[in-house]
Amino acid sequence: MTNAQAQLSGPESFLRDPSRLNMPWIESPFFETCLEAMALDPLRKEQARSYHDRGYLVIENLFEPAAIDAVVGRYEWLFNPRTVFKAPADTVQVLTRDPNRRQDAWFVSPEIKRLACHPKILELLAFLYGRPAIPFQTLDFLCGSQQPLHSDAIHFSCIPARFMCGVWVALEDVTLENGPLMYAEGSHALHDRQLFELGLWPKNLGGALGDNYAQYEDYIRAITTTGSFPLKRLTCRKGTALIWASNLLHGGSPITKPGATRMSQVTHYYFENCIYYTPVYSNPPIGQIYLRDIYDIHRERRMQHMLNGSPLPEKVLAPMRQHYEP
């Protein structure tokens, strides 16, 4: 907050101070007035408005080619089924459970960690959200995921809401043949739908998503049939980055060229001063929150659950961890 913003009071403080509301300023109802009050260069102003309106940014040349090539250079080792990873058992488990995806490979690859924590992406995310970013999970893909459309907000959420985003980086050129990303433009403006709103109770806490998630996917398919949100596919050059808001519907297109790779890295980010949780296992209306205890890859530390600048003691968090299943 600048000195001028600190001196604002009354309604004017909401209209001109991006940090006045406890939410990402990029999604604030006062976005336009806050944007005009900030001294921004034309590029930053354009990025902010695009992200606000569409729910994503596509950026070329954000990373130096050497950073991309360094990650690509680890892929043969990373995806070799004979590779033995030197990591804790739980890390090895998530690393190896999908032959097309290496989750949290930052633990075994400094190159992957450096890309996830690149200063340019951390700076841009801090601008968009008004808080320092926390890289907490990496996913490295050998081929396109072909994953159905979904919102990250059903998997990763926080209190206050919306302080979460994803960044995808193309590690090779992407065409219509090798399964490009697809996303529903503007869908980030939808309400963050939770299970109780679909008449469901969370089940199998921490385990397979099962029937509940299948019904959530039915809801997503119904949303996309309305035609309200144009479906885009991202064909791009190696090194391109896509940043998307937590509630943007996104997934993977079909691979039409058999055997085609689509090497890419996804990093998920939270932001500081939040309570972090997993909505698909939670019942917020009755105070049951499946807390997500996250590790900040960049600062190499466990994050405390916080609200309004104050860390929450376990006596406050413990009741949230109690769960009821009828």
Image (cartoon, rainbow, N blue to C red):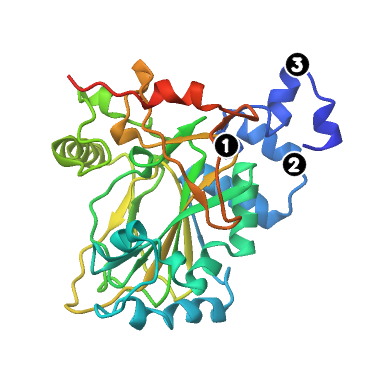
Amino acid under label 3? Gly
Where residue 206 sits, quadrant-wise, is top left
Q: Residue at x 60, y 36 (%)?
A: 273
Taking 83 as reference, is 129 above or below it? above
Q: Residue at x 32, y 76 (%)?
A: 84
Are circles 3 and 2 on residues that touch, CB within 8 Å?
A: no
Q: Position of residue 65 (x, y in %)?
A: 55, 80
Amino acid under label 2? Met
Q: Residues within 10 Å of mark 1 (few under 14, many from 20)?
A: many
Q: Position of residue 55 (x, y in %)?
A: 46, 46
Camera-side residue of 304 and 184: 304
Task: Measure the alpha-carbon separation of dots 2 and 1.
Answer: 15 Å
Q: Farthest residue to the left: give it.
A: 211
* Tag shown at residue 24: 1
Q: Earlier in the sequence, mark 3 or mark 2?
A: 3
Q: Is residue 39 visible?
A: yes
Are circles 2 and 1 on residues that touch, CB within 8 Å?
A: no
Amino acid under label 1? Pro
Dot 3: what SS?
Answer: loop
Q: Earlier in the sequence, mark 1 or mark 3?
A: 3
In this rendering, position of residue 179 left or right of residue 297: left
Q: Earlier in the sequence, mark 2 or mark 1?
A: 1
Label 3 sits on residue: 10
Camera-side residue of 228 and 13: 13
Quadrant housing the N terminus:
top right
Task: Measure the alpha-carbon separation of dots 1 and 3.
Answer: 20 Å
Are circles 1 and 3 on residues that touch, CB within 8 Å?
A: no
Q: Residues within 10 Å of mark 2 (few under 14, many from 20)?
A: some
Label 2 sits on residue: 38
